[in-house]
Amino acid sequence: MRTVTLNQKQQREVEILTRLKARALDVGTAAELLGVSPRQVRRLRARFRREGFQAVLHGNVGRVPANCTDPALVEQILALAGQGGKYQDLNVCHLQDLLDQPEQINIGRSTLDRLLKEAGLRHKARRSAPVHRRRRLRRPAEGMLLQTDGSPFDWLEGRGPKADLIGAIDDATGNIVYLIFRPSEDQIGYLLLLRTVAQSYGIPMSIYHDRHTILRSPKQPTLEEELAGQLPMSQIQRVMAELGIESIPAYSPQAKGRIERLWRTLQDRLTKELRIAGITTLEEANAFLPGFIDRFNLRFAKAPQDPNSAWVPLPPELDLNYYFALRETRKVRADHCISWLGRVLQLLPGKKDPSLVGKSVTVHIVPEGDIYLYYDRHPVAYRPVLASDPVPVKPMPKPMRQPRLANPKAKARQRAWLFAQG
């Protein structure tokens, strides 16, 4: 009896067919999820009823291929081409020639190449095809596009710890809109970036960034998420989506070349100015940055083509602690308590507020480390159960539903369209 291991795709197919068999899905939905026709789904369903999970396996699984190379021959070739072997430093084509003539071993070049690479005796040559690129014009107005990134570098030149410089630059003007030194490229750094930019300038239309998992979730959607039309999001990705900021992932460093060139400039200019100032700690370096940014922008920033800004101002009543925070969801117990990181927090809803037992509340952790609780956008007061708990007591805020942003993404796009009309 043979053992068969299903890969992730096959496990997903089994789950869909199981739901189809239990009539939790119809044939049309299953066909859409599997990417096949409804007729093929009916065939798979009938086979699944007869054979079980093996219905998703190819018929040749577990069989020895008819063109399989003799293992004894493979061992002989690897001995000749391996470390200390007769032909250890020959390239594949030369090795094939010598195996055919003196050794009387007839084997195809591609098969020989595959066997050597699988054994680790040869490595794939790294050949980069020439890439044809075109210069991308700047966005016409401020706030239409920000480029963000993090740059790990010895910014203090050995006088202090190494750090990541996280920053953002406006595409239209080249203005540095934010910089901060962090021990590493982390979520807190990007939260501070988004919050400070939103408070100082407004909400941008879009942000161009790399494919770091902090900015773009690598997870694949579950079947339930696919059915609901949802995609997995990282914490920062969620913040951008709620603020109406279009997230644009770059597929190469050259795609966001403006901020990549900024890092090259700062690694020259900023490091020397930090040295001249005698700075040795990240706290001192962060305190130095505002003045440096002002001087840099005055020297290098350009005027935008369109004088009308695309920044969308934050609503005055917007609760920053609700939007600019890391979130986790907790279910309220029968005693109106939740557990969070080994702590027990007692919820203190108002007398006229409905019971929260069995409901889900969100724990919002702002960059400073303070904790706020919300239920359906309403703030909820709480206190730690133990007096020794370092979590501060949060008084009941003014009962007010969190305002939803007035569709800033659509508003910004409308402005962009008006700009294009001249």
Image (cartoon, grey):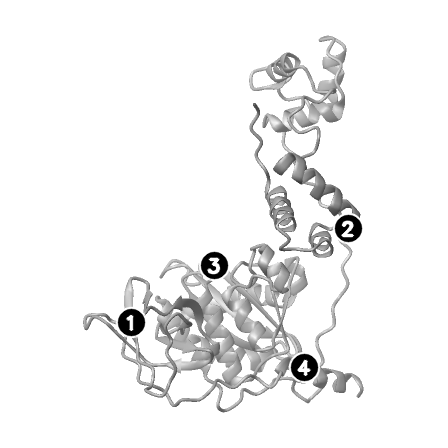
**Alpha carbon of mark 4 to alpha carbon of mark 1: how far?**
43 Å
Res 137 visible: yes
In the image, 89: left or right of 109?
left
Res 410 label: 4
The one of 133 and 346 positioned closer to us in this rendering? 346
Compared with residue 220, is residue 256 higher up or lower down, i.e. above or below? below
Mark before the other along the chain sequence, 3 or 2: 2
Identity, as a three-letter code, of the amino acid under mark 1: Asp
Q: Earlier in the sequence, mark 1 or mark 3?
A: 3
- Does label 4 or label 1 sit earlier along the sequence? 1
Q: Nearer the viewer, mark 1 or mark 3?
A: 1
Residue, disc 3: 153
Outermost residue, left side = 387
Query: Tag 4: residue type?
Result: Ala
Mark earlier in primary sequence (4, 2): 2
Residue 56 makes an appearance in the image: no
Compare residues 14 and 326 and report the one nearer the observer.
14
The residues tagged by marks 4 and 2 sit, at their Cα atoms, a distance apart of 38 Å
* Residue ID for mark 1: 335
